[in-house]
């Protein structure tokens, strides 16, 4: 070995190995998310096929949007002939919670470079936020990248698997899959309203207001969805603040 070539010092070796081990650690933490995302993404792929989307459109939605609730909602709005601008506005408000998640994690991401922050911001979902927020003291850019990569690839892979699996299903079963969308949202909502009459009232109010705006007012499905969501969210926030004030006065 030429004298000019020196072996890296232990500190330099650690700098090389540490990001890789941190990435693999984040990928390991993503395993529960990978399992959960794969099954839900398969349902989305199946539904996307039954709603007439091509394989490229279905895969692109999972790659670009990467937001389960918004993608399922978008399928329903597309099926109703909603304009693209209305769908964009609806999904924007539906995903507004991600702004709060990013703001919370940004306090711990201050040492990260700007490119790293921009890259990692895209992969923040409810599940990756939940895992990252419980391990904020040891989170690193590489670890967060591993966590988000596992979730991202699982969602895309599950979408494509579900889409192509749909080709093997009989037409009657493919048609029945359209009901899975409503079943999914009911599954997400029921565990919450079982423990809160307020949430049950808000959910029913949102459904009633949305139907009223479409049937009575003739508002397009996309805008009725946005108006109902914002109105009920504001009502929920207002009643929550009032309840806190009452509890504070009683104490």
Image (spheres, rainbow, N blue to C red):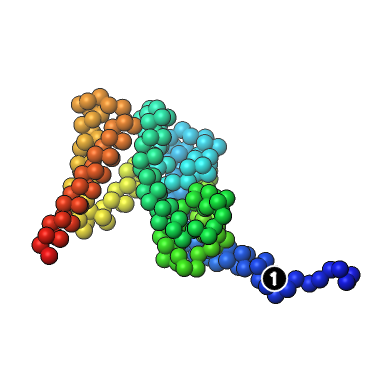
Residue 243 lies, with reference to residue 173, above or below; the image says below
Q: Quadrant of residue 177?
A: top left
Q: Residue furthest right?
A: 2
Q: Which residue lies furthest to the left in this view?
A: 250
Residue 167 lies, with reference to residue 33, above or below; the image says above
Q: Which residue lies furthest to the front in this view?
A: 110
Q: Which residue is drawn at 23% across and 48% down?
A: 237
Where residue 66 appears, x then y in whole percent?
Answer: 47, 46
Where residue 81 appears, x then y in whole percent?
Answer: 38, 27
Where residue 96 appears, x then y in whole percent?
Answer: 37, 45
Residue 237 lies, with reference to residue 147, above or below; the image says above
Q: Which residue lies furthest to the bottom in this view?
A: 10
Q: Quadrant of residue 205?
A: top left
Q: Can residue 75 be seen in this snapshot?
A: yes
Q: What element carries label 1?
A: helix
Q: In which quarter of the image is residue 218?
A: top left
Instruction: Name the side, left or right, on which 182 lies relative to 246.
Output: right
Q: Residue at x 31, y 27 (%)?
A: 220
Query: What residue does disc 1 label?
Result: 13
Where residue 103 appears, x then y in whole percent?
Answer: 41, 53
What quarter of the picture does the N terminus occupy? bottom right
Q: Can residue 178 be seen in this snapshot?
A: no
Q: Residue at x 46, y 61 (%)?
A: 108
Number of callouts in the render?
1
What quarter of the picture does the C terminus occupy? bottom left
Q: Which residue is drawn at 35% across and 40% down?
A: 93
Instruction: Name the side, left or right, on which 5 lies relative to 128.
Output: right
């Amino acid at each position: 070995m030429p004298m000019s070539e020196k072996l890296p010092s232990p500190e330099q070796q650690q700098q090389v190995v540490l990001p890789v081990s941190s990435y693999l650690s984040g990928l390991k933490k993503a395993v529960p998310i990978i399992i959960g995302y794969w099954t839900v993404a398969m349902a989305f792929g199946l539904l996307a096929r039954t709603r007439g989307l091509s394989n490229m459109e279905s895969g692109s939605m999972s790659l670009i949007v990467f937001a389960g609730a918004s993608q399922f909602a978008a399928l329903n709005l597309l099926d109703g002939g909603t304009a693209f601008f209305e769908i964009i506005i609806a999904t924007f408000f539906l995903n507004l919670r991600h702004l709060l998640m990013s703001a919370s994690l940004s306090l711990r991401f201050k040492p990260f470079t700007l490119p790293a922050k921009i890259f990692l911001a895209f992969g923040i979902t409810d599940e990756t936020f939940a895992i990252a927020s419980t391990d904020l003291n040891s989170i690193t850019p590489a670890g967060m990248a591993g966590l988000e990569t596992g979730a991202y690839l699982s969602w895309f892979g599950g979408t494509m698997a579900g889409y192509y699996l749909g080709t093997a299903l009989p037409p009657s079963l493919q048609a029945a899959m359209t009901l899975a969308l409503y079943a999914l949202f009911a599954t997400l909502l029921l565990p919450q309203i079982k423990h809160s009459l307020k949430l049950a009232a808000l959910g029913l109010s949102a459904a009633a207001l949305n139907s009223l705006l479409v049937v009575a007012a003739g508002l397009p499905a996309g805008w009725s969805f946005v108006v109902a969501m914002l109105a009920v969210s504001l009502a929920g926030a207002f009643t929550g603040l009032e309840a806190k004030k009452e509890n504070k006065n009683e104490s």
